[in-house]
Image (spheres, rainbow, N blue to C red):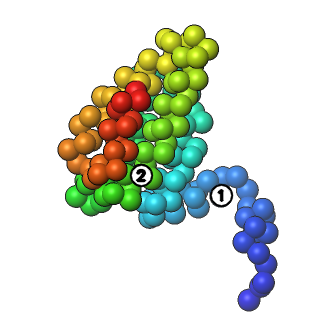
């Protein structure tokens, strides 16, 4: 068996292979999927409220258990991405680009309010997101 490092193996793969491997693993591992969505899902710039709603739903869905409930630890994890989006909205507002900031805030409110019914928000992550939006 080779002692080649994981980094060395990954460098040898092409981009298509890496994307396929990572996508497959993310579908099997909800924590990995939530981390990828929260850290990199906000790098896209959808511009429409509906697109932001889909992005936020994906982030939240990645933390749901098989019954659709988001537990305490998962709530914290998935809300990181939502807070990143809300930071982007605040940044846009500071630049007087309010027409680009409003869809983010609206999408967050429209998705987060009903989410309170299916999540453990004992530390106020979701409620804080609603207030921030």
Image coords of residue 51 (percent x, y)? 43, 28
- Vertically, is 57 above or below 103? below
- Vertically, is 86 above or below 120? above
Residue 50 seen in the current view: no
Horizontal arrangement in the rendering, residue 54 relative to residue 122 (left or right): right
Q: Gap in Å between the C-alphas at discs 2 and 1?
A: 28 Å
Dot 2 falls on a residue whose secondary structure is helix
- Vertically, is 126 above or below 35? above
Q: Nearer the viewer, residue 122 or 36?
A: 122
Q: Nearer the viewer, residue 77 or 53?
A: 77
Residue highlighted by disc 1: 18
Q: Residue at x 48, y 31 (%)?
A: 86
Of mark 2 and mark 1, the one earlier in the sequence is 1
- Vertically, is 24 above or below 105? below
Image coords of residue 116 (percent x, y)? 25, 42
Image coords of residue 115 (percent x, y)? 27, 41
């Amino acid at each position: 068996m080779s002692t080649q490092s994981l980094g060395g193996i990954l460098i040898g793969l092409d981009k298509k292979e890496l994307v396929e491997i990572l996508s497959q693993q993310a579908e099997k591992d909800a924590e990995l999927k939530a981390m990828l969505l929260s850290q990199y899902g906000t790098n896209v710039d959808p511009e429409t409220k509906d697109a932001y709603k889909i992005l936020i739903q994906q982030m939240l869905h990645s933390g749901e258990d098989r019954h659709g409930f988001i537990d305490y630890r998962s709530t914290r994890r998935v809300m990181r991405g939502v807070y990143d989006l809300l930071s982007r909205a605040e940044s846009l507002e500071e630049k007087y680009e309010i027409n680009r900031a409003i869809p983010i805030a609206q999408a967050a409110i429209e998705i987060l309010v009903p989410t309170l019914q299916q999540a453990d928000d004992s530390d106020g992550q979701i409620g804080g997101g609603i207030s921030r939006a």
